[in-house]
Each structure stands twice: as structure tokens, then as C-alpha cells.
Image (tube, helix red, strand yellow):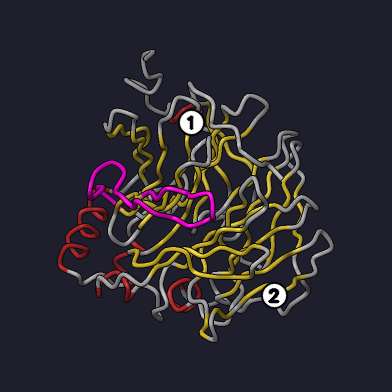
Amino acid sequence: MHRNPLEGWQVDRSAIGFVGHDLQRPECIIAQPDGVLWTADARGGVMRIEPNGHQYLIAPEQTAASDSDFESRYVQSQGTSLPNGLALTPEGDFIICNWGLDRIERLDRSGKVQVMHDHLESKPLGKTNFPLRDSKGRIWFTVTTTMQPWTDSINSEVLDGYIGVIDEKGIRIVAEGFGGTNEIRFDDKEEWLYVVESNVRRISRLRLNTDGSLSDREVYGPSELEGFPDGFAFDSFGNLWVTLVMSDKLIALTPKGDVLTLLDDGNPKATAQLNLHYKQKTLTPQIMQAAHGSLAPWMASITFGGPDLRTVYLGSLQGTRIPYFRSPVAGQPLIHWC
């Protein structure tokens, strides 16, 4: 195997640029080959950002969200539209996991929203987090927890996160018992589905079978990472880039199983408090809010873009713009871009 291009490499902070302005909760980012970016926006829709910097919001008309504190808006997050993960359909619509409304939506380019699902087997879905389309057109999705507020699921150590799928048979659960299910990604051959378990600080994976079922679940990489993983993406070498939210660190899990630190933007003192209370199961919204960096506060996702897939964009939960930088290796080409 050739030398890993990430060995000995770290992000040059002086070379980090920014795109977008006045964004609200740009948690998930989709990068088109033509340079257009789409990002989730807390005003209930998706922000389009052109290569020239022009941006406009696609969202249903609604009463402007009133000013509220962090806990009310982002922790309680009940009854207020908070688009989280995004996926594109072949028609150019967006599949949205709406964290605030606990549902899966479809948003078209005119701003019209269709509720696809808000219940499963007569029960509320819970905190829908991330949708993913595969090469067969199926929509896979995650639910982080069914607890309210969602932060209680961290201290309680409950494993109520699950993975579902939407296909010609309808909607159903295909795997459950996860600790804070977050982003999911397939490998380049669609043989394994990788899963972020934020609350228990690990990455797992499951084998995708021909009938669409998942099996052979195992932990991928360390049994416990140093922080809360949130978003991730493979590069073309096979490294898995992972964001650690709140401690605001970007790491990579190599094919050999090593953990590389690529960017550390955290606040050491606040991160130490975060980790202490995590171990003691005494986390509070205030402790969580205090732990963040400055580049992408509450670093939440990573997206490879640009014509050569070597421009890295970082999504966040508290940021108002998107940091980007160049990578020494290209991202993994998407199986099914749109």
C-alpha cells in the first residue's frame, strides 16, 4: 500500500477560508460538482450558496422564529423547524431529517414542504438526524433518540437510537440499539454501512445484505473516541474523516486503525469539563454550550467538494459561515450524487 497522504499532515489554519454569511445552524452541507453549496438552515429550509458568494434561502413561508436561548432552541428543540441532515433526490428535491419537528420531509426548489413520515408503527419517529440515498434509490435514515430533551439520552446511557429505510415496501426499522445514532455512510462498494454513535463515542458498521437487511455489526476503530463523533466522510485512500462536536476537533481513522488529529479548534479548558461531566453522567446544556471553538462552533459535518473533491467544507451547529480548506487527498466519489 502506498504511503497514507494524511500521515504527518495537519490543516494549515492560515489557509482556511470561509464561505457564506448570516447562516443559521449550517449542520449539513451538500457540495455540487459545479461549485454550488446547499446547507441546512434553521429557518426551516436549505440555503443555496453560489460560487460567486450569492446566497438565497429555500424554505416555506412561516412566522419568523422568535429569539430564544440556546437551551430552548437547540436542546429542547420541540415544535420548531430545525433541518438537520440533507439528501438530494434525482428530481433535485431535498430529503430532510427535521430535528426540531421529529419528522422526515421532502422540500422542493419552490420551498414547498411535504411531510413524508412522522410516525413509524403508530409511534412518533423521535429525533430524526440524517438521510442517505443509495444506488438503488432507497432512503436510509437515522433517529438519534426518542427521549425528550435529547440531551437526557447522553447521561442516561440509553441505547434507543435506530436506523430505518424507506423503499417500495414502505418505512421500517432495520437496526436498533445504538447510542445516539447520527450520520451514516456506505463504503465505495456499498458492502458496509458505517454508523456514528455519538453518545457512546464510537463508529460502528453493519454489512448490507442483498435483501436490504443489515448484519454482522461491529465497532470500527477505537471502542471509544476522545470526543463525540458527529459527521464523517471517506477519502479516496480509505481514511475516515470524523468531526468531534463540541470539542471541535477533526480526526481521521486510517485503514490501519490509527487515529490522526487533522485540526484541533477546541477550547482545552471547556473540553476538559465536557469530558469530565460526560464520564460522571452529569452533562448539562450549559456545559455543552460552553465547549466549542471559533472556526466552526460545534463542528458537526464534513463534506468533500470542488471539481477534484479536495476542498473540505465543515458544517456546524452554532456557526454563521462555512470554513473550507484544501486536502492532500480527494474525497471518496459519491455512489449516487443525485
Place of residue 152 in the rendered image (x, y in percent of width and height, measured from the top left): 32, 76
The quarter of the rendered structure image containing the N terminus is top left
How far apart, in angstroms, are the residues tagged by discs 2 and 1? 33 Å
In this view, 335 is above or below 293: above
In this view, 211 is above or below 325: below
Q: Residue at x 66, y 68 (%)?
A: 43
The amino acid at mark 1 is Asp
Q: Residue at x 34, y 67 (%)?
A: 177
Q: Can the viewer see residue 216 in this picture?
A: yes
Q: What is the secondary structure assignment of the residue under circle 2?
A: strand
Q: Nearer the viewer, residue 132 or 127?
A: 132
The amino acid at mark 2 is Val
**Number of other residues with Cα within 10 Å of mark 1, as a class: few under 14, some 14 to 19, many 20 or more:** some
Tell whether position 211 is magenta.
yes
Segment colored magenta: 205-227
Place of residue 244 in the rendered image (x, y in percent of width and height, measured from the top left): 36, 49
Where is mark 1, residue-wise?
Answer: 235
- Is 181 placed left or right of 90 in the picture? left
Determine the image quadrant of residue 145: bottom left
- Name the residue at the front extreme: 211
